[in-house]
Amino acid sequence: MPSYKLLYFNIMGLGEPIRYMLSYLGEDFEDNRINDYRKWQTQIKSKMPFGKLPLLEIDDKKVHQTIAICRYLGKKAKLVGDNDWEDLEIDIIIDTLSDFRSAIWSYFYNRDEENKKRVKEPLFNVTIPLYLGKFDNIIKVNGYLANGKLSWADIYFVAILEYFSFMIEQDIVTNYESISQLRDKIHSIPNIKKWLDKRPSTEW
Amino acid sequence: MPSYKLLYFNIMGLGEPIRYMLSYLGEDFEDNRINDYRKWQTQIKSKMPFGKLPLLEIDDKKVHQTIAICRYLGKKAKLVGDNDWEDLEIDIIIDTLSDFRSAIWSYFYNRDEENKKRVKEPLFNVTIPLYLGKFDNIIKVNGYLANGKLSWADIYFVAILEYFSFMIEQDIVTNYESISQLRDKIHSIPNIKKWLDKRPSTEW
């Protein structure tokens, strides 16, 4: 069994999908969390591949990029498609989730208060309901996000829901019934449930 | 042979990587370009999966998301890794290019002139040189962006270079020697060269 060491901040954020995937696989992993933001900025950031986290060490190899890592672990977990076409369907959902995340980031990480106010209205009234409504409907019709069956896209999505909810200041699962059902389905997978029971409690 | 119909705007932008990949494969494709932006906004946009382009029809199936499509075509072209680990290395680069694109977009598509000015300084002085410097160095050391051999990541990157250059108001290949060499290598592939010779001339 390979050894896994994750380095991220003490939040769910972009680290949580990797933690979910490793848990699903039944892999033990070191869950290293940076609490000291100043230390991150001055001592750690410049040593990261592109100045960012999460970073995952698999044995002695260091890899980054949450989605790339989740796809890799998804292959190990056999949570990929049965053929190239099904993998395309999974990747389409994943990239669309990234578009959605980018739209949210342009608001959440915006330090210009005036601009943030201006960005908020179209984001909250148009973009967020459009994306979440479509994701919810896909799940309603198919049971899952891609190919009508469980894939790593579902685990990635559910793992990142609390981060999304925190950033857009609303509990997504309260407002979207099929997303809520998918969340419950993923959270009832025994290895995921074990992770939820033992993970540190953080707000996002 | 499947039939391919691409729908995008009359620019290189996010459509060009798909055009490069189809050309590399030696596939004929309908290259439909929307020139009438008003028509796009009022008649076409709402019919697209998430209100966005490019859209590719493969036989009678419609798919979206440039990167997902390029990965799918990359498999057909045997421009993927030899194993899951090599595919991970390719995906890491691809996702890092997406981070870079997001950073550029926060400037280029910013309609708030005051905010745009504020975003420009750290983007142009820190983020752009950091990313391009690292990409250039990876190519310098390994010859290509991932695994020291040609992959769909190289074709995607070279196809999107002119879009990047346009958005950041500088010719990337003039300033980065190894990126320039990679561009030349990709552009000398006969099927890509054929596409370059016949494609419509657009600024970005």
Image (cartoon, coloured by chain):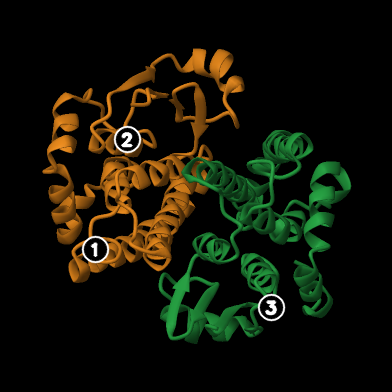
Chain colours: A green, B orange
- Can residue A176 be seen? no
- List the residue tagged with mark 2: B16
Residue A149: image location, x then y, percent: 69, 46
* Badge nearest the viewer, 2 or 3: 2
Q: Is residue B66 left or right of residue A93?
A: left
Q: Single out the residue that lies furthest toward the front.
A: A82
The residue type indicated by label 1 comes to Asp
User: Hey, what amino acid is under mark 2?
Assistant: Glu
Counting from the top left corner in percent of width and height, residue A61 is at: 42, 81
- Whether tag 1 and tag 3 are in contact, CB under 8 A, the answer is no
Q: Nearer the viewer, residue A136 or B44?
A: A136
Q: Residues under labels 2 and 3: Cα distance?
A: 40 Å
Task: Provide the secondary structure element on which disc 3 rests.
Answer: loop
Q: Which chain does the numbered disc 2 sit on?
A: B
Q: Secondary structure at mark 2?
A: helix
Task: Check residue A10 in the rendering and tell me which mark sits there, or answer none.
Answer: 3
Above or below, B3 against A58 in this view is above
Say if residue A19 shows up in the picture.
Answer: yes
Which label's residue is closer to the chain start, 1 or 2? 2
Residue under pointer 1: B136
Q: Residues within 10 Å of mark 3 (few under 14, many from 20)?
A: some
**Quick one: label 1, few (<14), some, or many (20+) residues within 10 Å?**
many
